[in-house]
Image (spheres, rainbow, N blue to C red):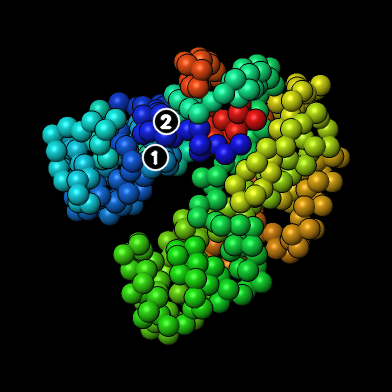
Amino acid sequence: MKLYNHIKNFQHDFIVEEKIKINREGEYPLYILEKSNVSTLEAVRLIARLFNIHPADIGFAGLKDKFGITKQYITLIKRDFPEILCLKKQNGKWIKTRRINLFKESGFCIKKVGKHYKKLEIGEIEGNHFKIKIRGLNSRLIKNIQRNVETVRHFGFPNYFGEQRFGTLKGQKDFILPFLLKEDYNKVVEIYLKNKGYHGKPGNWEEIYRKLRNRLETYEKDFILGLKRGLKPEKALRILPKNVRLMFNFSFQSFLWNIYLSRYIKEKYQYKSVNFINNWKLNFYTYVYDIDYLKNLTVPFTGKDIKITDPILEEVINRTLKEHRIKESDFEKEVIGIKVLTDGKRKAVVFPENLSLSIDTSSTASVEFFLPPGSYATVLLRNLLS
């Protein structure tokens, strides 16, 4: 089953609305950002450029995908800004417009809705409400969805990290963090450039810059120009923004965490194996005999600071870390100015709220649900379709 054969065929097939607690008082202008075929970060950069402010001056609680129609909130710094701003992409250029049809055009609008007491930050969100159209179905897939919806209502679904967490990774060997741990910075640079579309050997920075220039962010141009000036790879990597460097850690830790939970499910429950990205597979339970236990289970990232009391979970975590040659001395190690492999925990199971299903035609269905922050609609959809 290839998920994207069935979803996101059209922009309006995937509608997401962010829910946050709004404080109507404060000094920070609060705007609602509605967009289509534009990522959150791209919209933020365009707004910053137009208002002549730094992108870091714009606060937001979560990142929304480029594809789909999404609604979220942003805060600006304490200044006077227009009440409404709309931009649409036309013939490859961004132009201002009075209004935009998000169902047919690519672009975004921001509209002032009040004030907030502080700058919005990642995670300050109650969750997201989804309306999703599923296409290309047959009678077998419709029966799967109907059966799986009932299973999810009773037992929730495994709270795996979705593909958005892994960015442009092409496969397991392309994770950057293991090479950072080995301090193989030349290999890190090679992988980073490969993920940007350059598949040659690093070294001719003038040629690399020329080939990649049109697809690079400003900070990535500075990174390559730093290498051209003679900076050592370790120093040049520090030019990348901290949030980008942190993603090297987060993507790998998320990959390991998914393995922990997938193996735990395989050890304990009736399960089905479902295709994921990069030829990975994830196990989804089909029945849970101890749901009161499982729904309260949290899975740590390393187990260094958080005591693991479940013996099955402890075994799969230790086995996974050993297989990937992660040692305790790697925990909280500092590389390129960031601390990696830090501990934390994540709920093993998530229960979508107000999950509803309608069969629209013999080949299409619609689902609607609400998920808490950090949970992925695409993971739920893989479960429903399998």
Q: Is residue 153 left or right of residue 273?
A: left
**Residue underneath mark 1:** 67
Q: Is residue 347 left or right of residue 363?
A: right
Specify the amino acid type for callout 1. Phe
| Residue at 81%, 30% in the rendered image | 269
Which x, y percent locates residue 70?
36, 33
Q: Which mark is residue 323?
A: none
| Residue at 33%, 52% in the rendered image | 56
Which x, y percent locates residue 13?
41, 29
Mark before the other along the chain sequence, 1 or 2: 2
User: Where 95 sits versus 348, above or below?
Assistant: below
Is residue 323 something one can see in this rendering? yes
| Residue at 27%, 40% in the rendered image | 106
Residue density around tag 1, few if under 14, some if 14–19, many if 20 or more, within 10 Å? many
Depth check: give the residue in front, 110 or 286.
Answer: 286
Residue with the most extreme bottom position: 230
Q: Which mark is residue 14?
A: 2
Check if mark 1's residue and mark 2's residue have beta carbons within 8 Å. yes
| Residue at 49%, 71% in the rendered image | 199
Q: Quadrant of the C terminus?
A: top right
Labels in figure, total: 2
Depth check: give the residue in front, 300 or 281.
Answer: 281
Quadrant assignment, res 273: top right
Disc 1 and disc 2: Cα gap in Å? 8 Å
Specify the amino acid type for callout 2. Phe
